[in-house]
Image (spheres, rainbow, N blue to C red):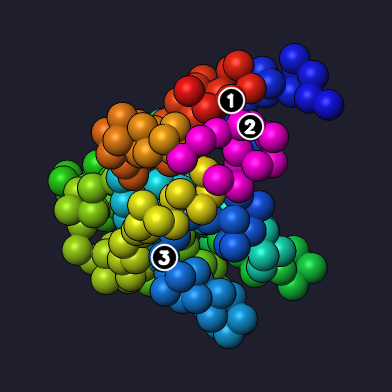
Amino acid sequence: METTADLNDFWTDEFAPKCLDDMVLTEELKSYFKNLLQSRNKFNLLLAGSPGIGKTTIARIIAKELDASVLFIPCGVEGTVATAQGKLKMFCDSMSFEGKPKIVILDELDSASGTQDNSFQKTLRNIVSESPDTMFIGTCNYVEKVIDPIRSRLGVVNLSFTKVDLMVRIRNILEAKKIKYTRQAIISFVETVIKTNYPDIRQIISILQASCASGKLI
């Protein structure tokens, strides 16, 4: 039986994807990422999509699946030339620990400046070219704010899913939490929440939890 503490846990954390199959994505995108991992080849990616769609989650899942040594850079805070020339360059130049692949996750890369001659993105361009044994996974909300040389070096992957993909996840959550619901309640949730907040999965699941506080979807 569920306790009050269980009901108060954040569902966005509890149901955060642990593997690619947990992600709300089209089957084509899931297959693309799985094939990429199975190839065991080195690759770079620039994951593009709206906030809440799962870009950072996918980047972390890929790193976990590859058992990689990871440097995570929140570019909105640390997207500076000093960071690029300091810990980023140091990580890329370092020896791989126990033969593990090295991955740099550049979170919210579009928030780091790329306009000045002396900018994070322009410094990054050279580091990517000079670091063949390091993989780079960038995330961005607005791909046009990432300079062309970075886009071409990483390769843009636009994340997407359908409302049907999302509904499968919603039903799985409701059943896992033993929440009662009717067909009409689902239709109402689609009309009032999903259509308004799509494709922000985080926001949709947060509203879903609030809507189920009584133990049933209302």
Disc 1 marks a residue whose amino acid type is Lys
State the extent of the magenta-drawn residues as a range.
171-183
- Of the residues under marks 2 and 1, which one precedes in the sequence? 2
Residue 182 magenta-highlighted:
yes
How many other residues sit within 10 Å of disc 2, few (<14), some (14-19) or many (≥20)?
Answer: some
As shown in the figure, which amino acid type bears the numbered disc 2?
A: Ile
Residue at point 68%, 21% (across, down): 7
Question: In this orientation, which residue lies closer to the viewer: 153 or 216?
Answer: 216
Q: Residue 37, image x and y in percent?
A: 58, 75
Tell me where residue 122 appears, x and y as whole percent. Answer: 26, 55
* Distance of label 2 from label 3 (alpha carbons): 26 Å
Whether label 2 touches label 1, CB < 8 Å: yes
Residue 179 circle label: 2
State the SS at label 3.
loop
Which image quarter holds the N terminus?
top right
Distance from disc 3 to disc 1, alpha carbons, whole Å, reads 29 Å
Q: Which residue is mark 1?
A: 216
First in residue order: circle 3 vs circle 1: 3
Front residue of 165 and 123: 165
Residue name at image x 31 percent, y 41 percent? 198
Crowd tier of the residue under label 1, counting other residues whose Cα lies within 10 Å: few below 14, some 14–19, many 20 or above: some
Q: Residue at x 17, y 44 (%)?
A: 116
Q: Which residue is mark 3?
A: 26
- Along the line of sight, the residue nearer the viewer: 142 or 165: 165
